Image: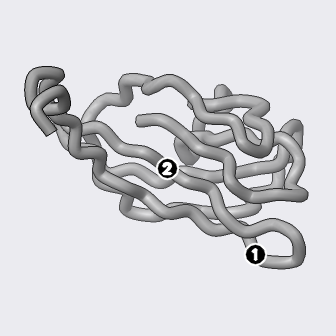
Amino acid sequence: MRLIHAAPGIDKLDIFRAGDEEGIFSGQSFAQVTEYKEIDPATIELTVRKRGSKTDGLKLKDVKLERNKLYTFVLLGGEGKPLACKVIEDELLPRREIRNK
């Protein structure tokens, strides 16, 4: 999975697996795109918090991460709008197919 912080006006964010103390992604700033991070396949709950906060700004329940699939989590909202997240299953093509398009 990877993260795109697309919520202007919202400080740095941390993404946690519910119940974990260490973030999957920590200190992500607006317009930042992370590298992919490998997460074990499972159905999990994720929480989004402002950097250093113990209060959940957003909870994502029943997030299903499947083996051999890539996901992009896009954090949206900000500037007076509530924090939201769009989960996208990435469809990657082999390099050969990209060159032929």
Quadrant, the N terminus: top left
At 59% from the left and 44% from the top, the residue drawn is 4
At 72% from the left and 42% from the top, the residue drawn is 31
Q: Is residue 7 left or right of residue 91?
A: right
At 36% from the left and 43% from the top, the residue drawn is 71
Q: Is residue 100 left or right of residue 23?
A: left
Task: Using the image as rendered, state which of residue 96 and residue 31 is in the foreground.
Answer: 96
Expressed as whole percent of the image width and height from the top left, the position of residue 81 reads 79, 77
Expressed as whole percent of the image width and height from the top left, the position of residue 91 reads 22, 44
Marker disc for residue 42: none
SS class of the residue under badge 1?
strand
Amino acid of disc 1: Pro
**Mark before the other along the chain sequence, 2 or 1:** 2
SS class of the residue under badge 2?
strand
Amino acid of disc 2: Phe
Give the alpha-carbon distance from disc 2 to disc 1, as whole Å: 16 Å
Quarter assignment of residue 62? bottom left
Quadrant, the C terminus: top left
| Residue sitting farthest toward the front | 100
At 88% from the left and 70% from the top, the residue drawn is 79
Expressed as whole percent of the image width and height from the top left, the position of residue 64 reads 29, 53
Colouring style: one colour
Say few, some or many: other residues with alpha carbon within 10 Å of mark 1 (under 14 / 14 to 19 / 20 or more). Answer: few
Q: Is residue 19 above or below residue 47?
A: above
Q: Is residue 26 left or right of residue 87?
A: right
Say few, some or many: other residues with alpha carbon within 10 Å of mark 2 (under 14 / 14 to 19 / 20 or more). Answer: some
Residue marked by disc 2: 73
| Residue sitting farthest toward the bottom | 81
Q: Is residue 63 left or right of residue 80?
A: left
Residue marked by disc 1: 82
